[in-house]
Amino acid sequence: MTNKAEISINELLMIANQIIQDHQDYAEGMRATSVTEKDGVLIFKGEYFLDDEGLPTAKTTTVFNMFKFLAHKLSPEFTLSTLLV
């Protein structure tokens, strides 16, 4: 049995984006735009700041690490609600 709170995607994205904005590694334009859950792990996605040729930039690594941080921080606390609201 799990002690995770059920939460809607929109509510979770609001929490995640507030954490991103408050984080010391925040960069302008960084935000989570979607979240899914697989095997109990929340997977956040958003803009990865690729260059004109589609290659990673220095900001790409920062965003990837932020989404990884969110997964580690929020996955133990929340599970996505299965209700369609």
Image: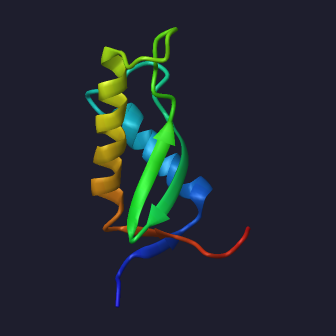
- The answer to whether any part of residue 26 appears in the image is no
Left or right for 20, reference 35: left
Front residue of 5 and 55 = 55
x then y, percent, for residue 83: 67, 75
* Picture layout, residue 39 above or below residue 21: below
Q: Quadrant of the N terminus?
A: bottom left
The residue lying furthest to the right in this view is 85
Give me the residue at 44% from left, 47% from top.
16
Residue at 39 percent across and 37 percent down: it is 20
Q: Is 75 situated left or right of 79 in this image?
A: left
Quadrant that contains the C terminus: bottom right
Rendered location of residue 21, percent (x, y): 40, 32
Q: From the viewer's perspective, is residue 8 above or below residue 68?
A: below
Name the foreground residue: 27 vs 49.
49
Residue 74 drawn above or below residue 53? below
Task: Identify the image quadrant of residue 82.
Answer: bottom right
Is 57 left or right of 46, judged from the image as shown? left
Q: Which of the 4 quarters of the picture holds residue 76?
A: bottom left
How many marks are shown on the rendered structure? 0
**Residue at x 38% of width, y 70% of height:** 40
On the image, the x and y values in percent for residue 34 come to: 56, 47
- For this view, does 57 lie left or right of residue 81? left
Q: Residue furthest bottom?
A: 1
Question: Residue 29: in sight, yes or no?
Answer: yes
